[in-house]
Amino acid sequence: MNHHVVIKLRKPLRDGLRVPAWVDFISDKSVVIERVDPDVDRVMDRAKLKFWLTREYKPAGADWDADEVLHGLDRTYRLIVQDDSVVPDDLVQQLKRLPSVQDARAIEVGETVVPTHEPPRAFSLAVSRVQDLIFLPYAKAFTKGSPDVKVAVLDTGVNLDHKELAGKVTSGANFVNLTGLDTTGFIGDVTGYQKQPEDEVGHGTHVSGIIAARGLEMDEGVAPGCSIMAVRVLATMRSGDRLVGAGIVDNINTGIKWAVDNGADVINMSLGIKHTGGGLPHEDVVRYAMTKNVTVVAASGNDGTAERYYPGALPGVIAVGAVDDQGAVTPFTSYGAPPAVVAPGMNIYSSFAHHAYAFASGTSQASPFVAGAVALLKSFALEQGHSLTNRDVGHILKHTSDKVDSRLRNEHAGYGLINLADAFKLLAHLLP
């Protein structure tokens, strides 16, 4: 593949240097820059690597704002190697040692398991019990969500004209681009930047239905009045007998920033990537989201171990574990993040790709229950003329979730199973 190296400089390059963003450059090479600074250039020249200089991110407005500058997004660049030259193993370390470079990393393909799904079977009353488990009907007496509250689903895309989601997806973007990789194991489109974020395998559609489905042939979504932003950041590949969501970690970062800059109030990331070295995955851009008061909700992971998965393990992110239909924490819930709360995640019935429906289990299914709950809380506050901060949201979840034992926070269940009746009682009390 054409290797990419991401560098974060200590200072941005000189004013007036019109460096294109990588998302624009891959389709429009009318502006070509092949140098950075003398030190970086010297390292690349010694390695005999010709490259194109691009920006990792685009500014939200005409210029970089204070929050983008604070987190160094204005001085983060992507060096795209121009041919198939082998990048030396120690190149990143050489770049990190330069006085002008704060951080450097090679791009990597992150993987997250796509939970297996089952086609619809005889619909049972137990399916509807899921919403009773978290007292959702009580919350919906306050609000079913505001269309002005946007939930960004960063995933495999969304079946855009699924009848359960018709009119719910108000914006979208596609950041999957695996051009140059061996993609023989992948399913469907893997070079689709700037194409519609259509879901080909169902994971993102399942998640979106849990959040906002109309309730035609399934339970109504948690926040059916809210808007969905479909942000495709994962392609899907086969790995043995299972499906794995795969995407370039830095492309996911670009998707996070796009969602923030386009008005997301909540971001759901039913995915997780292990920390394999260097800076923590998604760290800068998630901090940027927090600064903009965007609530990030993520799956804790599905291996049942203390392995840390990101972004769930980043400070401020609401990591979510899964419970079964009796409210017991599932054996597959990873707890290294650690979870902030737990939510239903076993045999969840929802919309699926190609206009279908399916059952699926995983923390991927639990996360959108919490993202939808946060969207409901933000909607009710907005309808009362107020806004909730991330601190407010955390306070409400911490003090209203049903504890699984006598401790304030349990290693496997966090503060407990979300309880939307108590959450809305506390919110109503807190609002002036």
Image (cartoon, rainbow, N blue to C red):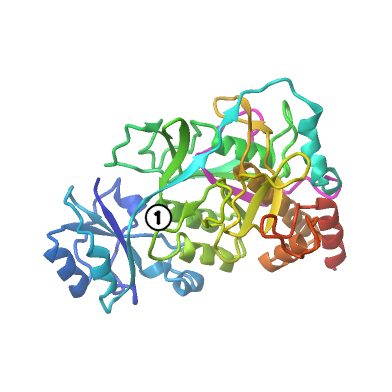
Image quadrant assignment for residue 78: bottom left
At which x and y percent is residue 105? Answer: 33, 62
In the visual, does 350 lie left or right of 137? Answer: left
The residue wearing badge 1 is 250
Could you say which is closer to the camera, residue 376 or residue 326? 326
Query: Dot 1, how many residues are within 10 Å of its Cα: few (below 14), some (14-19), or many (20+)?
Result: many
The answer to if 364 sits in the magenta stretch is no
Q: Relative to residue 278, is residue 132 depicted above or below? A: above
Q: Position of residue 147 (x, y in %)?
A: 69, 47
> Dividing the image into 4 quarters, which one contains the C terminus?
bottom right
* 250 lies above or below 37: above
Q: Please indicate whether residue 37 sits to the left or right of residue 269 in the image.
A: left
In percent of the image, x 23 and y 59: which residue is there?
A: 89
Looking at numbered disc 1 in the image, what kind of residue is underneath it? Asp
Pick the residue in front: 61 or 388: 388
Residue 388 x, y percent position in the rendering:
72, 64
Kindly give the residue lying farthest to the bottom in the view shown.
Answer: 99
Residue placed farthest to the top in the image? 122
Give the magenta range. 140-167
Q: Is residue 186 among what the camera can see? A: yes
In which quadrant of the rendered image does the N terminus lie? top left
Give the quarter of the image for residue 36: bottom left
Q: Secondary structure at mark 1?
A: helix
Q: Would you say the magenta stretch is mainly helix, strand or loop?
A: loop
Q: Where residue 364 sits in the image (x, y, percent)?
A: 60, 44
Residue ID at (55%, 29%): 353
The tally of labels here is: 1
